[in-house]
Image (tube, helix red, strand yellow):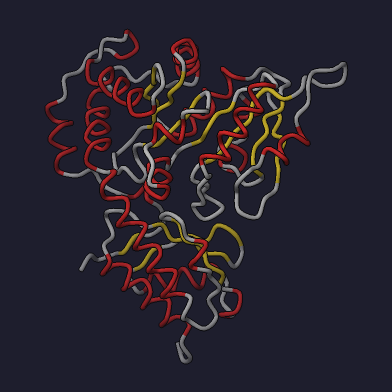
Amino acid sequence: MNAVVDLRSDTVTRPTPAMRRAMFAAEVGDDVFGEDPTVNALEERAAEISGKEAALFVPSGTMGNQAAIAVHAAPGHEVIAEDRAHIVLYEWGMLGRFSGCLARTIPTDDGRLTWAEIRKRLRGPSDHYRGTGLIELENSHNQAGGRVYATAAVEEICANAHVAGVPVHMDGARIFNAAAALGKTVREIVEPVDSVSFCLSKGLGAPVGSMLAGAADFIAEAREVRKALGGGMRQAGVLAAAGLVALEESPPKIPAAHADAKYLAESLAEIDGIGVNPADVETNILFFEIAQTGLDNADFIAGLKARGVLALGLAPGRIRMVTHHDVDRAGCERAARAVREICSPGR
């Protein structure tokens, strides 16, 4: 049994032996000069998987998203996004700090925007405001518990947005999880959007890095933005090598992580004081409510940690667990047991 069952995030995964071997053997060059063959191979593979003309290797998902915003939109533009989107809550206000854009958010119950709601916020330029410069979709949606967009919904949003002359960017940090949940390819999911970012270091388990994909001219501009953000990484092939392995070996592991998240939800739903609906769990992210336990987040998380389980409290009375390929079913069973013990009388 592992000493710790770490369910804080799928970012905690460690590189596999195959990734480490690839990193050790990677052929490298200066990526800022476009001369790192392993980075170039990774970008070509990411473009192929996403069905886009080109792709760019960036250090983080935040950089990928912010580069996309900076290219698609201009200072003063409004960016329409779901109220709890990662670009709004967790990217250090870079939407305004770097791109000079405004977030025009739409609250939803499940993290999924609809064209009917977007249309109400869409604005063209006038004497008083610059108008909408970009629509952003998060798929799967972290704060909505890993919920996934139906492809028809994405197609409807993109078709209408493009008629209005507004591009659409997808924050697909966990797009491979979305693909597994829908039984579709990544290419099918992102075909309508103008650009997509996805993480190598979450569900795919690489040690670091994300990809941004889109049209060739878009990626050329994004490369300049990457440099402005300090993302020129020189001999980055040692990192890209792990990403190449992750793209091939990790997607088949994702359904097991989804099954583990569903198992956790079903197990926790049986515990008095825990609020969770297993039907809401679509991918590898699970949120549950603890208000009825009488414990606050700090005490609840401390109780888990004392039992060798790590989780996150991202809002008062709300705990998150994220399954991944470094935690097996036995680890999930241990986590469920730990929650049951914390909630039992005489704890």
Residue located farthest toward the bottom when viewing the structure as drawn: 346
- Return the x and y of residue 263 as percentages of the image width and height: 37, 68
In depth, the one of 121 and 337 nearer the eye is: 121
Q: Residue furthest top?
A: 33
Left or right of 257 on screen, residue 98: right
Location of the C terminus by quadrant is bottom left
Identify whether 198 is placed above or below 300: above
Question: Closer to the camera, 75 or 120?
Answer: 120
Q: Quadrant of residue 138?
A: top right
Please tell me which residue lies in front, 271 or 89.
271
Q: In this picture, is 66 found above or below 30?
A: below
Task: Kindly indicate the quadrant of the structure image that contains residue 310.
Answer: bottom left
Describe residue 136's horizontal placement relative to residue 51 as left or right: right
Q: Residue at x 61, y 74 (%)?
A: 291
- Location of residue 180 in the rendering, given as x and y in whole percent from the top left corner: 37, 47
Q: How many marks?
A: 0
Q: Residue furthest right?
A: 127
- Residue for point 42% across, 81% down: 340
With 129 as the anchor, is 11 left or right in this view?
left
Instruction: Give me the residue at 82% from left, 21% from top.
Output: 129
